[in-house]
Image: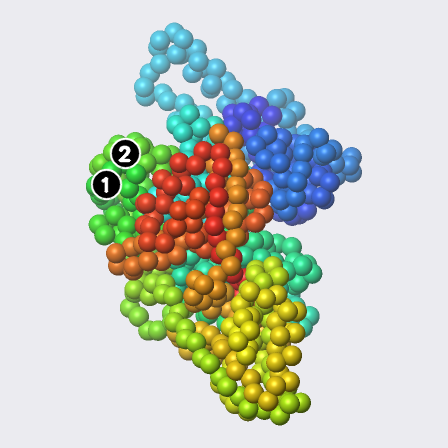
Amino acid sequence: LCSECGQFHLLLDNHLYNFQNDVDDELICHICLQPLLQPMDTPCGHTYCFKCLENFMQEYNFCPMDRKKLSFQQCHKSSLLVRNLLDKLIVCCPFKAECQQKMQRCELEAHLQNRCPGFKKYKSELQWKKNSISKGKEDPSTKVETSMPKDPEVPSGGSSLVAESSAAAVVSLGTAEPGLVNPAFEETEEDLPQRTSLVAETNTIEIHREDPEEELGMRIVGGKDTPLGNIVVQEVLRDSVIAVDGRIAPGDHILEVNGVNISSVTHCQAVSFLRHPGPVLHLMVLQEKIFSNKTAQQDSTSAASREVIHVTLIKRDRAEPLGIKLIRKTDEAGIFILDLLEGGLAAKNGKLSRNDRVLSINGQDLRQGTPEAAAQIIQSTESRVNFVVLRQPGLQLSEPVEESSTSNSSSSSSNRGSPVHHRRRLDQNHYRRKSNYQKAIAIKKEPKESLGITIGGGRDNKNKLPIYVTSVQPIGCLFRDGRIKRGDVLLSVNGIDLTQLNYYEAVSALKSNAASHSVVLKALEIVSLNSTEQSLDIKEQGFSWSPLWITWLGLPSYLHCCQDIVLSKGNLETWGFSIVGGFEESKGNQPFFIKTIVPGTPAFRDRKLRCGDEIVAVNGVPAIGMSNSELIPVLKEQRNKITLTVVSWPGSLV
């Protein structure tokens, strides 16, 4: 028990207090999520506790909030005014049973040492226990718990893990997801106890628009019809509504839009929801926020009405993944099953379920454990992995929006008391490449008659796109002909290849050939696989048109413009990205996609790799046809340098 604040916390952690009133968010540290202690200001305008920032900067070189480059030496103490405001916050004595005093925060230590009857009783009982032990006369019937005052209450403004008021679901991303490739994290046993964890939390963000039809200004990738599963923010456009708000960043997962769960919808459905006009938009997002090494809270829930289940999974070899995603919650200690990867050992076994609490693995107690510790046990096991889990029967999960009426169970929960969100439902609607076909169109026209189309793309574009049609005007020969449509990729005009030209070269080629009496256009049409995508054109009023991200995935490989990204790292570093996809017997060949890029890692610092990028090859070895488990060793074998050949398509604009 800390003698300064009267609370239980780790020696290196900040003090904890029971604040009488809610504390203004401007006075909260966004690392520990508690009112600031010894506040330090950064050059980019954020303020953190001295200890929190010092510990963070020992591992990383960027600001936890906006991820701008930062060193501890650039930071300075907050103004005296701010420090005085914090010291004058009213707190309650933590020993409520014996003392109901309220005082300024700066007065609590003196109160505990000199005036608090509860703390005095605690110290005397502690001293009595020490004396009894030293004399060897301790009686089992007189345990400290029965005679001491109650433990001080956890502060109402937050806990040592995360503030209750934030209703945040803390998800461990600091370990390889068992069952998912995560070459960013390959921890050794000696690294595990000391290493802090990258965590994420769900937050509800309210976006206001003066013009209800103004686009948000971000690009998204993913969807249940792709290996990515979730809807992920790929890019935030400069000076857009989202950029001005400043709370959403690339890599964030969008879980809900205006209360509608989109964590298990198709890409096109998600675009439709996000493009829906309105002055206010409520988004629930899963965000990488902080790094924490704090211990779990004591389990305060009763095990009554719960069922203990024993499950054994048998791996063929040590490297075989189980296909389980583990998380932590804010309102319960321990670790829980968030998702079971389709086709993985756990899903095939069928005995583990989402939201099961893991009590132990191979006999090792995990009731106060972390996902990192569980992953370490699983990965080090040769064959049999024995789970003991606690299941609460009748747990209700909210229904996601479905593409069609199905009886499959939901994959997400919107219960604010326990905000755990599942990535996607296990179903048969797995990712398929779209079909496409070429068309050659010969048109007779007047010499002065225009083609009547506008185009986009070009190999000078940031994403090195092929030339595509952005609109067919109601004047011109192509509108009259009717065979060229918006979204078609133009391959050639009168025999001149357009596929490798930049935008201005393509415009020049089309204009010069439009002067002829006849024009022969070769184009590629990407066929839509569902009605939602076709109806998006009708709902796009007010949005600048560009093809959806999922449309680009249907292009044949000869139109891909690949780029090599070279990453370098130290011996103790990890690459910093995770991938999904690969060959599965039930689905065939699926592309590998970048799903997560971890702040502070080589992949993050390089800035070229993006969520949603497709991996074509690793060090020149093609990834097509490889399974998830075959690509893992290829990535892990590269010690200090790796070359990723990727195709990067722009996310869908919303």
How far apart, in angstroms, are the residues tagged by discs 1 and 2? 9 Å
Q: Position of residue 397 (x, y in %)?
A: 37, 59
The circle on residue 504 is none
The circle on residue 315 is 1
Badge 2 crowding class, 10 Å Cα cut-off, few under 14, some 14 to 19, many 20 or more, is: some
Q: Position of residue 513 (x, y in %)?
A: 61, 80
Of label 1 and label 2, which has the lower sequence position?
Answer: 1
The circle on residue 381 is 2
Q: Are marks 1 and 2 in contact (CB under 8 Å)?
A: yes
The residue nearer to you, when weighing 653 against 414, is 653
Q: Secondary structure at mark 2?
A: loop
Give me the residue at 45% from left, 79% from top: 439
Identify which amino acid the numbered label 1 is placed on. Answer: Lys
Is residue 460 positioned above or below 602 on the image? below
Badge 1 crowding class, 10 Å Cα cut-off, few under 14, some 14 to 19, many 20 or more, is: some
Give me the residue at 22% from left, 50% from top: 349
Q: Residue furthest top?
A: 135
